[in-house]
Image (spheres, rainbow, N blue to C red):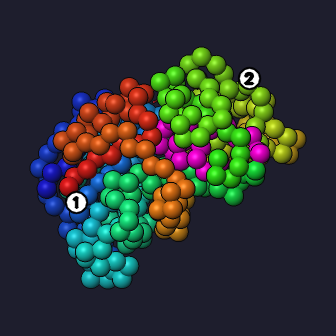
């Protein structure tokens, strides 16, 4: 089968389209014929080996040589002990913690991975955008926001941010979206009441918020704390290693005034996938696919992500 392989950390040019051996299922594995796989910032991080935590499992060379974690496809074969799915069923899910490898024609996935049946109304490309970015947004925002709360999404024009912003608006919040200047019109188009260009202004000096969801933390926790309203909540999802460590440690010490400051550890699961599919089916959640590429275009897709011009999501379509 064809797969996009990286044997060393580096820029998108280190990726190679190769002919590799087709995966064979163990007793509790599924083989998925991949129809679409979306691109996440985490793919960029594992490609480049930065931040350092992206090198888990391979400090010098990547252990997992095929990137891609968000899949939508058809079950091709199952091992003898698999009871969850049958060949022919259409599924989607996040295989980040189950070996990855979605930028390929087929991928082997253990039956413990969080996969859900893809509703027929949802296309493969749309379905592939939901697993990582949608679940981050759901767990970061849903049930955490009340009508008229002030919510700030840092990184609102990216994959998780664009979903999170829409979910905060659904709950009736007043939402500020932060991202680069190129993405401001897009962020407004999906519902932001206010926008901040991070290259021009510092959101930690723009007022206080009841919820801040930070997809790309680069600020000190001391600065961030000033932007969290009393009783408010701050959750960091991604960013540099220092910021994540600082949120988990110093953040707790700064949480006085009934503020809740910490890291969002996302737990991929089937129920959230189905909830997201339902939101898309009812029109409550809009999926924005900036561009889609064939498998041969993974390098180009990751170059575009690195250039900071992706509005919402990029998708690789194999079929
Ligand atoms: N905590 C967990 O359990 C967990 C699980 C999965 C993933 N993650 C992490 O979640 C993070 C976000 O993922 P994603 O796929 O949504 O990323 P994404 O699509 O790249 O979105 C991030 C957005 O933030 C923007 N941005 C960059 N620097 C910024 C800054 N200083 N201030 C404000 N915005 C900035 C980016 O713009 P540019 O295009 O200009 O860069 C981009 O639009 C990743 O770091 C990933 O590793 C965490």
Q: Of helix, strand and loop, which one carries label 2? A: helix
Closer to us: 114 or 25: 114
What residue is disc 2 on? 205
**Magenta residues?**
148-168
Height in image: 100 above or below 13?
Answer: below
Residue located 48% across and 50% down the image:
286
Height in image: 236 above or below 267?
Answer: above
Q: Position of residue 111 (x, y in %)?
A: 37, 72
What residue is disc 1 on? 106
Q: Position of residue 140 (x, y in %)?
A: 62, 51
Q: CA distance from mark 1 to mark 2?
A: 48 Å
Q: Give the quadrant of the N terminus.
A: bottom left
Q: Position of residue 237 (x, y in %)?
A: 58, 43
Task: Report the residue that reaches farthest toward the left.
Answer: 19
Closer to us: 75 or 181: 181
Residue located 20% across and 55% down the image:
319
Residue located 30% across and 74% down the image:
89
N-terminal-most mark, 1 or 2: 1
Apparent side of residue 173 relative to residue 216 in the rendered image (left or right): right
Height in image: 191 above or below 89?
Answer: above
Residue located 21% across and 45% down the image:
294
Q: Is mark 1 within 8 Å of ligand 1?
A: no
Q: Does residue 217 appear in this view? A: no
Q: Does residue 142 appear in this view? A: yes
Near mark 1 (Cα within 10 A), the count class, few <14, some 14-19 or many ≥20, is many
Closer to us: 281 or 317: 281
């Amino acid at each position: 089968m064809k797969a996009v392989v990286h044997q060393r950390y580096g820029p998108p040019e280190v990726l190679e389209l190769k002919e590799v051996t087709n995966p064979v299922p163990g007793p509790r594995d599924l083989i998925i014929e991949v129809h679409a796989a979306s691109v996440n910032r985490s793919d960029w991080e594992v490609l480049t080996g930065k931040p350092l935590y992206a090198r888990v499992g391979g400090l010098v060379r990547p252990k997992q040589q095929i990137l891609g974690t968000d899949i939508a496809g058809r079950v091709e074969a199952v091992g003898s002990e698999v009871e969850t799915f049958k060949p022919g069923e259409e599924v989607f899910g996040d295989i980040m913690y189950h070996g990855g490898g979605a930028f390929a024609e087929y991928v082997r996935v253990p039956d413990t991975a969080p996969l859900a049946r893809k509703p027929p109304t949802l296309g493969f490309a749309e379905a592939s955008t939901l697993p990582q970015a949608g679940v981050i947004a759901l767990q970061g925002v849903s049930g955490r926001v009340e009508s008229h709360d002030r919510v700030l999404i840092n990184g609102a024009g990216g994959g998780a941010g664009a979903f999170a912003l829409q979910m905060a608006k659904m709950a009736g919040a007043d939402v500020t979206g932060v991202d680069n200047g190129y993405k401001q019109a897009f962020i407004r188009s999906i519902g932001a009441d206010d926008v901040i260009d991070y290259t021009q202004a510092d959101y930690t000096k723009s007022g206080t918020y009841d919820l801040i969801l930070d997809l790309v933390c680069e600020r000190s926790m001391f600065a961030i704390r000033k932007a969290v309203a009393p009783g408010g909540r701050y959750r960091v999802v991604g960013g540099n290693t220092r910021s994540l460590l600082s949120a988990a440690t110093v953040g707790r010490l700064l949480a006085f005034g009934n503020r809740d400051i910490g890291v969002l550890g996302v737990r991929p699961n089937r129920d959230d996938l189905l909830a997201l599919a339902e939101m898309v089916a009812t029109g409550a959640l809009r999926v924005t696919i900036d561009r889609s590429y064939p498998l041969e275009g993974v390098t180009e897709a990751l170059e575009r992500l690195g250039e900071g011009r992706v509005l919402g999501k990029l998708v690789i379509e194999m079929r």
